[in-house]
Image: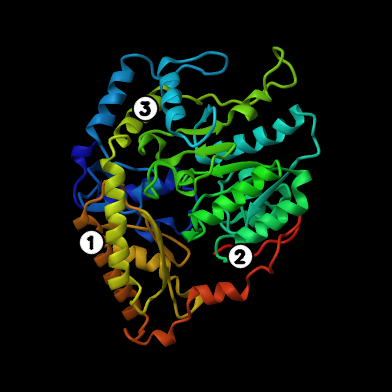
Amino acid sequence: MTTGEATAGQAARWVARDAAVVWHGFTQMATYPDQAPVMVDRAEGRELVDVDGRRYFDAISSLWVVTLGHRVPALDEALRRQLDRVAHSTMLGNGNRVVVELAEALARVVPVDEPHVLFASDGAVAVEQALKIAFQHWVNRGEPGRRTFLALGNAYHGDTIGALSVGDAGFGADVFDPLRFPVVRTPGYDDPAWAAKAVAALDRHHRHLAAMVVEPLVQGAAGMLMAEPEDVRAVAEACRERGVLLVADEVATGFGRTGWLFASEGCRIRPDLLCLGKGITGGYLPMSATVAAGPVFESFLGEDLGRRTFYHGHSYGGNALAAAVALRHLELLADGSVLANVVERAEQLADLARRSLIPHPAVATVRQRGLMAGVELAPPSPGARWGRRVCAAAVGRGILLRPLGDVVVLVPPLTTTASELSRSVSVLVEAMDQVMAEDGVPPRRRENLRPAAAAAAATASPDGDRPPGASRPPAP
């Protein structure tokens, strides 16, 4: 069936076809058809249009990857021009003109000294590459004992085995515990003393640490947990003073989400390894990058086919089509107006949160940095599934949202207008009102609700770091 053939009432048919052959990530396929999934047919601007012609404002930027909206003319044209050249050529031992141009453009703006860029296809692999680079860096320098990583509680870095290992529990990771390697773990951003505890762990373990992995400013998948820039900077300085490499995972926070082009800039840090993904191509094509600082890159230089070589690479790493759109995307971000809009919309969102969300009886708290916000709900019981139900009610009103447990995440495109943001918050309020009414919760009886944050605190990990192999508390 073509786009033109899609008529009213086609969604159920497409869902059935979908469920018969597609396996969706982070989705229980036995119940997938019952969750009223949106079946997208096309997009216009910042809206997705389903097979029945219904429109949805993409308030989650299609899992945080869409930056400027859908079908951006300048990005469309960049792809078309590159199609007239070449769609893909291997980067293993060879180069490609547009990939070199993209690497040069990135090198001018990333907060990394003497940067060298290794491309891949998604954020988890960017992290995986960084872990392998950090590990081999010390082997190449004759210090093979530095093979452990320091990571934070609540962290999420992707779903490959290395990324799962430095990530914390939750997200179904526990089933893979036998495959995960042990790390040193200290509390995440939900602990006000997280930075001091991380520095203390660096003092105790630095002789055995290859690197520390952090998500600068925002632990996104943990439910938008926020850190102060000075705390991140203090930890980065401690890593530098103790000779521990710093890996900054900016897969989610990079390319304007926080109001800075990179969150590391807002913290005034210069990581040794920077992981990029999601928004790098504006949501057009899969691409990620691991950016290594000069001293790290140089530790891999040696004789041809020698032991210092980094024996790692991916078939589609440095794809030319993705590089062409990423290069044009970076040029559009350099304009300045996009980041200025992020700052304006972030201020508007903070004001809307103060007036409409924080006072709402269904809300436990709101956390925000730039255009990354998490609205933590306060369900009356853990099994109420308010996160999913509120998002479903919002989708029914034309606002596409996706929950992280009982945290409703609002991550709209960087070009979102004031009216689109206002509508999104209004619909979220209506959705919360609907779910409360369905459960018979009086609209002003906040004391009847049990904040999810309080439940999480009951199972919080003890203070201090957890040594390799220690148990992990459940993530929010």
Q: Earlier in the sequence, mark 2 or mark 3?
A: 2
Q: Which mark is residue 193?
A: 2
Crowding around mark 2 (Cα neighbors within 10 Å: few <14, some 14 to 19, many 20+) is: some
In this figure, which residue is indicated by the disc labeled 1?
422
Q: Are marks 1 and 2 in contact (CB under 8 Å)?
A: no
Instruction: Pinpoint residue 385: horizontal percent, then vertical percent.
Output: 45, 70
Per the model, the C-alpha gap separating discs 2 and 3 is 40 Å
Q: Is residue 236 above or below residue 87?
A: below
Per the model, the C-alpha gap separating discs 1 and 3 is 32 Å
Instruction: Pinpoint residue 405: horizontal percent, then vertical percent.
Output: 48, 64
At 73% across and 59% down in the image, what residue appears? 466
Q: Earlier in the sequence, mark 1 or mark 2?
A: 2
Q: Name which residue type carries label 3.
A: Leu
Q: Is residue 118 above or below residue 26?
A: above
Q: Name which residue type carries label 1.
A: Ser
Of the two numbered discs 2 and 3 in the rendering, the one whose residue sits closer to the viewer: 2
Crowding around mark 3 (Cα neighbors within 10 Å: few <14, some 14 to 19, many 20+) is: many
Could you say which is closer to the camera, residue 204 or residue 404?
204
Q: Are marks 2 and 3 in contact (CB under 8 Å)?
A: no
Mark 1: secondary structure: helix
